[in-house]
Image (tube, rainbow, N blue to C red):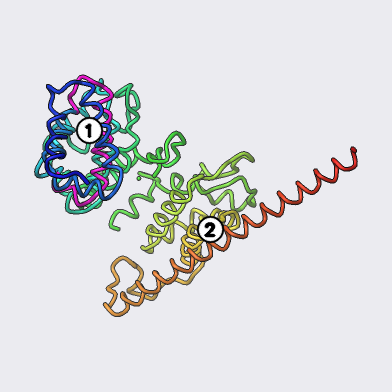
Amino acid sequence: MLSDSEAAELLSFLTPEARPDVKGHTTTYILGLSGNRDGCRFLRTKPDIIVALFALTSDPSIAIVKDCYFSLINLSADETLHQVLLADIKVLQTMLKKLLDPEYVFSDQICSILSNLTRHLKTCKIVFKVLQEHVGVAKLVEIFCSQGFNKHAKFNYLGPLLSNLTQLPEARSFMMDKDRCVIQRLFPFTQYQASVMRRGGGPHHEWLLSDDVDILPFLLLPLAGPEELTEKENEGLPVDLQYLPEDKKREEDPDIRKMLLETLLLLTATKAGRDIFEKKSVYPIMREFHQWEKDVHVLAACEKLVQVLIGDEPETGMENLLDLEIPEDVEEKLTKADAKEQEELEKEQERMKQEEEEEKKKTSDAEGAEKEQEAGLIR
């Protein structure tokens, strides 16, 4: 890594007055440096370089600004640098101001940085506080839902940002405010095919499942396929899921499928939720999905949901699973069991992958032998 004198020399090349070609070479070098853990940790010890890098996001050269932003994305992905970025450099106010500019070219990069900075609860609180003071979550939702806000930006990373903010009770309260209709505006993006990032985003369960919000079709439709259900099963489903066409495709991303299943499972934690799931005939969709799914992690999530759907109701007084107090020793056992299950799933996934590769090799060898045989016959 660089010595103190080399780092000081590097810093001298990051001033607004430095020659553009020198600045450009320096920012490109730092971008490479920020692309690995050791480089990030080194830059953490040199906050002056990060300050200069952030100042150059206002440079007239688009190439230099681009290098600076991508370096900051890499740095913000390292949790140990969050304090430097938020407290020492105070990047938030400047970035939020630029985010509101409908002509700003690097709004998507700002969204990526903000998404990284809100992954952990401690820094999420800081970002949320500054955000509410200067922009407001309502404005972020408006930008996210208005695709024409900035012709230079897609704002896809506002999805993960909004999702991260819901770690905080105050952010969840805003999203669930019955008078604002915020959550309803976000539902259509569970099926937004142009971006995985947009798709990938207790006391409110009954309201969420009610006709006022009607969350269920938005969660189930990406998991539903073209399989033919009985007339009785179709009639029990929400209208949007009845008699789906033969070319209906399921969500392609396994992480999103798993996230949707986990969300559905949470909604079955209350008796009201389970009753609505039964009334809306959720089971047939899950039955067909289980037969189609190949990813072992997603299958495990599906099986947990199916167990609730077809299982017996909990005893009186235990209907709301979110309210149950779990003793520490039991919680510890459950955590260990979950870790063991994950380990077994990883092994199963690896085994299936090896079998698939072996099958491909057999097919390839058979095709090769067939071609050789045909060539011999031609001769």
Camera-nearest residue between 105 and 50: 50
User: From what the image shows, is residue 377 above or below residue 254?
Assistant: above
Depth check, mark 2 against mark 1: the one in front is 1
Q: Main secondary structure of the magenta part?
A: helix
Circle 2 crowding by C-alpha within 10 Å: few under 14, some 14–19, many from 20: some
Position of residue 243 measured from the top left corner of the image (x, y, whole percent): 60, 43
Q: Residue at x 51, y 55 (%)?
A: 282
Question: In the rendered structure, which amino acid carries the disc numbered 1?
Answer: Lys
Mark 2 element type:
helix
Question: What residue did someone put label 2 on?
Answer: 283
Q: Report the side of 356 relative to 218 (left or right).
A: right
Q: Which residues are magenta?
A: 57-84
Residue 361 visible in the snapshot: yes
Quadrant of residue 184 within the rendered picture:
top left
Camera-nearest residue between 316 and 177: 177
Q: Quadrant of the C terminus?
A: top right
Position of residue 301 measured from the top left corner of the image (x, y, whole percent): 46, 60
